[in-house]
Amino acid sequence: MTEQRKATLRLGENTEPIEFPILSGSMGPDTIDIRTLYAKSGLFTYDPGFLSTASTKSNITFIDGDKGILLYRGYPIEQLATRCDFMEVCHLLLTGELPTDNQKQHFVNTIKSHTMLHEQLVRFYTGFRRDAHPMAVMVGVVGALSAFYHEAMDISDALHREQSAFRLIAKLPTIAAMAYKYNIGQPFIYPRNDLSYAANFLYMMFATPAEKYEPNPVIVRALDRILILHADHEQNASTSTVRLAGSSGANPFACISAGIACLWGPAHGGANEACLNMLEQIGDVSRINEYIKRAKDKTDGFRLMGFGHRVYKNFDPRAKLMRETCHEVLNEMGLHNNRLFKLALELERIALEDEYFVAKKLYPNVDFYSGIVQRALGIPTSMFTAIFAMARTVGWVAQWNEMIADPDQKIGRPRQLYTGTGHRDVPTDKINN
Ligand code: CMC
């Protein structure tokens, strides 16, 4: 048996060293297990933003940010994006394995049996303002699912957890498309189970009772790729939110709703929408330098949306694949000369050569290209992050399920470095005033 490696901490010359086990995963950096630090030393660690903290162990997704590697259950994202469809990737993330043909058929049929919403829930939409952002509606409606499935919400029961996972994956496209339809004042379009996951979503978004709508296969393929590339991404902000919410024993619908709320922020999934809004704001190739200058100015809050990543410091492998799709789609739709897309590609070129962005390793991330692709596909900007949420639901659910089943799981309860006022007394003349 090999001896466990230990990290030794010395707090001062005349103090006893304190030892902590070093844990090794199957890949990636080793991790110092500091769970006993406070008990042994009375000290906390301080790591806002989790720059050096592994918040959990997980066997779902692996990222090597320096090498630009992303693996789902061991499979490289490049292979999954080019050889599999989204349903196969969902099966992989949930169960750990790609499905056989029979397993895929069964999985797809199961998902299809849950695509509709309870009619009471459909009525829930009318309580929102018509101009509500689709993400606001999604936070509400997904959270409200917990009011509909009391009979299958025992989180200690693996079958109940599985049932909730199927429901969430199946219903998210319906919920998102209905948020859009409500927003534009068109009637809701119910799911068509003869279509693929991506095609059905496009159908629910763009069909009307008045006209026949057949989803364009180029658009379906591009959307399927967007879904695969966004399906999971290790312990990012929204996934950590789902885990933290779930650590208290909250139900899965409430947890995923919390994840959607977190994803909406412009530093996270909201970046795709923010990126398109930024391109509109820049407006013309001649103004790119002005905005690059602003992005470098520390006194200006402006950032180039769709650039930079906490983990990827050389390139984002998802962005590389999305960039390919972006060019395919622009060619296919004859949009390479469109003002906005020309502007986006010129911004990409200038930023990639700019000293500031090169030195800080700020490359276009997946959201830069996914925003452009979605715009080219005719998807309204306000739906970009909703589509991200649809894709990420399987990742959130897989991570939530992994956490609940983990015997080491405890309620997430960080501590703090208190910097407020010390103890003080309320003046006695305030008593009974
Ligand atoms: N434009 C201009 N400067 C930037 C940008 C940017 N987009 N991103 C980072 N920087 C600078 C930042 O000012 C800082 O400079 P300094 O060291 O001089 O203070 C340095 O680069 C490091 O930035 P940071 O904010 O400390 O890095 P972070 O790891 O905390 O943040 C990020 C990562 C993605 C939130 C950030 O790069 C950003 O805000 N990007 C724009 C939003 C975006 O595209 N988000 C989508 C991320 S990918 C999809 C997803 O996973 O959600």
Image (cartoon, grey):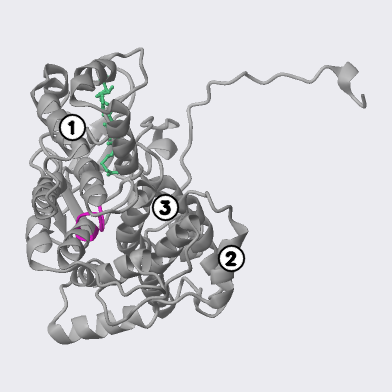
Q: Is residue 26 above or below residue 272?
A: below
Neighbor class of circle 1 (other Cα within 10 Å; few <14, some 14-19, many 20+) is many
Label 2 beta carbon within 8 A of ligand 1 = no
Tell me which numbered mark, 3 or 2, is placed earlier along the sequence: 2
Q: What amino acid type is highlighted by mark number 1?
A: Leu
Compared across the picture, whether 143 is left or right of 392 comes to right
Neighbor class of circle 3 (other Cα within 10 Å; few <14, some 14-19, many 20+) is many
Q: Residue at x 54, y 68 (%)?
A: 146
Tell me which numbered mark, 3 or 1, is placed earlier along the sequence: 3
Q: Look at the image and say whether residue 220 sits in the magenta stretch.
A: no
Which of these two is toward me, 114 or 154? 114
Q: What amino acid type is highlighted by mark number 3?
A: Gly
Is residue 239 shown to the viewer in this render?
no
Q: Which residue is mark 2?
A: 124
Which of these two is toward me, 424 or 316? 316
Q: Residue at x 24, y 15 (%)?
A: 293
Which of these two is toward me, 390 or 231? 390
Residue 259: numbered disc: 3
Mark 2 vs 1: CB contact within 8 A: no
Which quarter of the figure has residue 396?
bottom left
Provide residue 412's location: percent of width, then percent of height: 45, 49
Q: Residue at x 14, y 56 (%)?
A: 71
Which tag is nearer the camera, tag 2 or tag 1?
Answer: 1
Helix, strand or loop at label 2? It is helix
Q: CA distance from mark 3 to mark 2?
A: 21 Å
Provide residue 141's location: percent of width, then percent of height: 52, 62
Which tag is nearer the camera, tag 3 or tag 1?
Answer: 1
Q: What amino acid type is highlighted by mark number 2?
A: Phe
Query: What residue span does the magenta drawing correspond to?
Result: 227-233
Compared across the picture, whether 380 is left or right of 96 comes to right
Helix, strand or loop at label 3? It is helix
Tell me which numbered mark, 2 or 1, is placed earlier along the sequence: 2
